[in-house]
Image (tube, helix red, strand yellow):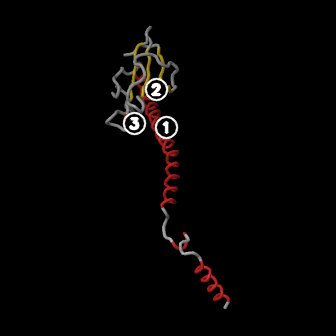
């Protein structure tokens, strides 16, 4: 009995509500609501997308550092086994005795850029060794055959290039 009374009361209340009331009479959203939601989503995307792209670039540079570490390990191993460093070669060219050397159009390189192994005599029978990653734009911005940074084992940013200096050694280069 009480249930029937509640049902009839609820039906009476609902029947007295206006039919154009949003939650009962209409299906979907009106144009203004859609525009507001679209505007809010646009603002959120404008904030999130640049941060996401920065993180993607950061991950690619981290991959380049890992590749350069691998190249450096192979160069040091070559030096220990042969008493000299591999000869200087052009960019995107694998030096003799270095197995870990990613090359453009052959291997997957961050930003489809390139690496360059460099060795040259820095005067007074000293050999300077460095590895350069050409960065996001794929163009060398750092100078060649010139001591840019002499502290070995550290990574240096030069514009968008990344340079790893292996050191200045007291033996002449090949």
- Sequence-earlier tag: 3 or 2: 3
Please give left or right for residue 138 compared with residue 19 in the image: left
Q: Nearer the viewer, residue 3 or 17?
A: 17
Q: Secondary structure at mark 1?
A: helix
The Cα atoms of the two marked residues, 1 and 3, are separated by 11 Å
Number of marks: 3
Few, some or many residues within 10 Å of mark 1 (<14, 14–19, 20+): few
Q: Quadrant of residue 115?
A: top left
Which tag is nearer the camera, tag 1 or tag 2? 2
Coordinates of residue 133 in the picture (x, y in percent): 42, 29
Q: Residue tagged by mark 2? A: 159
Coordinates of residue 70 in the picture (x, y in percent): 44, 32
Q: Nearer the viewer, residue 39 or 148?
A: 39
The Cα atoms of the two marked residues, 1 and 2, are separated by 15 Å
Please give left or right for residue 172 compared with residue 23 in the image: left
- Sequence-earlier tag: 1 or 2: 1
The Cα atoms of the two marked residues, 3 and 2, are separated by 15 Å
| Numbered mark located on residue 26 in the image | none
Q: Quadrant of residue 101?
A: top left
Q: Residue tagged by mark 3? A: 111
Q: Residue tagged by mark 1? A: 58
């Amino acid at each position: 009995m009480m249930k029937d009374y509640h049902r009839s009361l609820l039906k009476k209340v609902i029947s007295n509500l206006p039919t154009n009331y949003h939650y009962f009479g209409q299906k979907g959203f009106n144009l203004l609501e859609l525009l507001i939601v679209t505007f809010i989503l646009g603002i959120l995307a404008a904030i999130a997308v640049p941060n996401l792209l920065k993180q993607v670039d950061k991950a690619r540079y981290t991959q380049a550092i890992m590749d350069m570490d691998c190249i450096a390990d192979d160069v040091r191993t070559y030096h220990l086994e042969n008493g000299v460093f591999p000869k200087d070669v052009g960019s995107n060219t694998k030096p003799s005795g270095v197995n870990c050397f990613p090359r453009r159009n052959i291997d997957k390189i961050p930003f489809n850029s390139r690496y360059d192994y460099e060795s040259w005599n820095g005067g007074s029978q000293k050999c300077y060794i460095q590895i350069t990653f050409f960065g996001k734009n794929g163009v060398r911005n750092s100078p060649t055959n010139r001591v840019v940074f002499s502290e070995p084992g550290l990574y240096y940013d030069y514009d968008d290039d990344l340079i790893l200096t292996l050191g200045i050694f007291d033996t002449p280069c090949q």
